[in-house]
Image: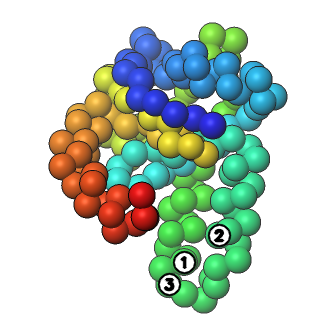
Amino acid sequence: MFYGEYEHKLDKKGRIIIPSRFREISKDNYIEKFFITRGLDTCLFMFTEEEWKNQELKFKNLSFTKKETRRFNRLFFAGASELILDKQGRILVPAYLKSYAEIKKDIMIVGVSNRIEIWSRERWDEFYATSKESFEDIAEKLMDI
């Protein structure tokens, strides 16, 4: 559903403008509400309400008696915030999430199929630089193409 890389900046009030393509997809699919939380690799994960419920169900089915499950669930769900785009397609990300993702001004918004990832520009550049060379190796390990 969500694909592509988009460069943006926080506005003067610290809001993030969601790319117009993602806003169109949301409108076409009657998506009004999103959930944002701590992601992996020091980025933020943003899910539609429907996808958030799917993720929540997966994590509810994990055994809470396992230490790793409890730790992950606490960080993932405690960090979550419900969002609705304003009329200009902006969101206000809580300060604790911006701090977690090291977001200051320049950001990358990345569509990763069922979720949107929000990265600080610096962290995205680091991730991309260290990952692009191994893209083919990763594909070979994960799937038969």
Q: Is residue 41 left or right of residue 2?
A: left
Give the class, few, some or many, for how many residues have Cα within 10 Å of label 3's Cα (few <14, many ≥20): few
**Disc marking residue 67:** 3
The x and y percentages for residue 84 are 70, 28
- Quarter in which the C terminus is drawn: bottom left
Q: Are marks 1 and 3 in contact (CB under 8 Å)?
A: yes
- Quarter in which the N terminus is drawn: top right
Residue type highlighted by circle 3:
Lys
Separation of residues labelled 2 and 3 (CA atoms): 13 Å
Tag 2, which secondary structure?
A: helix
**Disc marking residue 69:** 1
Sequence-first disc among 2 and 3? 2
Q: Is residue 133 left or right of residue 16?
A: left
Q: Which quadrant would residue 26 be assigned to in this image?
A: top right
Q: Are marks 2 and 1 in contact (CB under 8 Å)?
A: yes
The x and y percentages for residue 62 are 64, 79
Residue type highlighted by circle 2:
Phe
Q: In the rendered picture of this protein, how many numbered marks are placed on residues? A: 3
Separation of residues labelled 1 and 3 (CA atoms): 5 Å
Q: Are marks 2 and 3 in contact (CB under 8 Å)?
A: no
Relative to 72, is 40 above or below? above
For disc 2, the marked residue is 59
Residue type highlighted by circle 1:
Thr
Sequence-first disc among 2 and 1? 2
